[in-house]
Image (spheres, grey):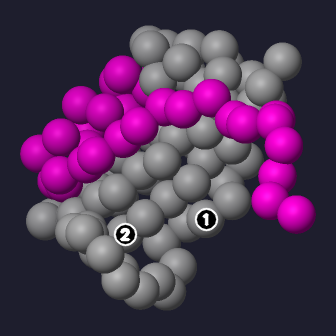
Amino acid sequence: MSKGYWIVRIDVADQEQFKKYAAAAPGALKKYGARFLVRAGIFQNPEGTARTRNTLVEFPTYQAALDCWSSREYQDAIKLRLPASTVDLVIIEGYDGPQPS
């Protein structure tokens, strides 16, 4: 079974309110086996548009990624995030096929 990922792009308008979300979200992420691969690091945006923060979260399965986002715990955390930020979030299945050689 393929891993699942959240690709998250965020602009934070209210840092103090966003901290409440950041404190509430880890419980759900831990419950579904999430692991941060990228978390608001330095980046360049050579094409397209960008937001000020980018995050890549890995889950053990695509279903776990879906279940975490849909969970009561994460939905409660989202309510804290909504007034503080603008977010683009994609939940995507990992790729296990051939790689460039």
- Residue 73 point in image, percent of width and height: 47, 21
Q: Is residue 27 visible?
A: no
Q: Earlier in the sequence, mark 1 or mark 2?
A: 1
* Local SS, label 2: strand
The vertical placement of 54 against 97, above or below, is below
Q: Which residue is mark 2?
A: 53
Q: Which residue corresponds to the image point at 13% horizontal and 65% vertical from the top-left?
A: 13
The image quadrant that residue 11 belongs to is bottom left
The number of numbered badges drawn on the structure is 2
- Residue 53 point in image, percent of width and height: 37, 69
Q: Is residue 36 visible?
A: yes
Question: What's under tag 2, amino acid-wise?
Answer: Arg
Residue 81, disc: none
Q: Which residue is mark 1?
A: 38
Q: Which residue corresponds to the image point at 46% horizontal and 83% vertical from the top-left?
A: 43
The image quadrant where one finds the C terminus is bottom right
Q: Is 49 left, or right, of 56 in this rendering?
A: left
Q: Is 86 left, or right, of 61 in this rendering?
A: left
* Local SS, label 1: strand
The vertical placement of 3 against 73, above or below, is below
- Residue 87 point in image, percent of width and height: 25, 48
For the record, the magenta segment spans 73-101
